[in-house]
Image (cartoon, helix red, strand yellow):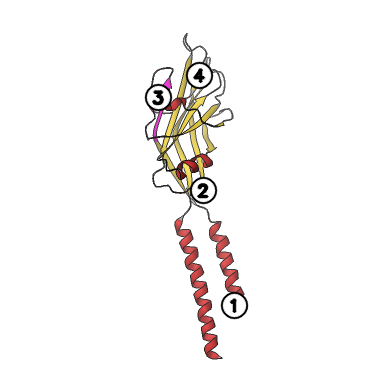
Amino acid sequence: MHNFMKAIAATVFMLLVFTSYPAYALAISASSQQTSCNASFPCGQPGLGPAQADDFFNEPLVQKSAIEFSLAGLTEISNANLRLVATAFSAYPEIFVNDAVLEIHGYSGDGTVQLADLDINHLLFTSEPITSLGVYSFDVTSYVAMLVAGGATYAGFAVRDVMPNSAVSFSSNTLVVNVPEPGQIWLMLTGLAVILLRYKRQLIFKRHLV
């Protein structure tokens, strides 16, 4: 009975260890990202540059952006973060006087950002003001998990600046997902089988001695 309790304790320990073992992180680069300048699309080099101005050289300006990431090979995720790297503010600080505030809308993409994607209306969240350059990480776990479960091939995010007279540019953007490691499950089951087999052999050996 003592050995049996030890076997049970070891099994419980392995379950606790392997079920809490962190999944591995996968950083997915953008398959497509584009920005519009009013009716012009695409505008400039591929990238994210949400902005708006009431008077930009005698006309209003609205820049909308969208970005897509491949979900190929993903069957399950435990966490997902949209990671945007703010690399520049406007070269016209006398016009863009405010800090950008982003609306992030989600959609199922096809690998190439289209003009219509920029106006997708499925709000996931609104950011805090973008006050400095650097990395901004946004939790999109539930939305990406829903796309993966539904068999979507690309996760799309429309990025719009809702603060008047503000602008920011993002580059090196990624979707970082945590993927459960299948090997963890098999390793746990293998370890459990070894423990039970060893206990069974001990029982058989003891019966032969009696």
The amino acid on which the numbered mark 2 sits, given as a three-letter code, is: Ser
Residue at image mark 3:
115
Which callout, 4 or 1, points to the residue nearer the camera? 1
Q: Is residue 101 visible?
A: yes
Q: Taking 208 as reference, is 111 above or below it?
A: above
**Which comes before the other along the chain, label 3 or label 4?**
4
How far apart are labels 4 and 2 at the CA level? 35 Å
Q: Do the residues labelled 3 and 1 touch (CB within 8 Å)?
A: no
Residue at image mark 2:
78
Which residue is at a point 48% across and 47% down the rendered structure image?
Answer: 77
Residue at image mark 1:
3
**Which comes before the other along the chain, label 2 or label 3?**
2
The C terminus: image quadrant: bottom right
How far apart are labels 3 and 4 at the CA level? 17 Å
Question: Which corner quadrant of the image does residue 10 belong to?
Answer: bottom right
Could you say where residue 179 lies in the image, as x and y percent from the top left?
A: 47, 49
| Residue 52, numbered label | 4
Q: Are marks 4 and 1 in contact (CB under 8 Å)?
A: no
Residues rendered magenta in the picture: 31-46
**Which comes before the other along the chain, label 2 or label 1?**
1
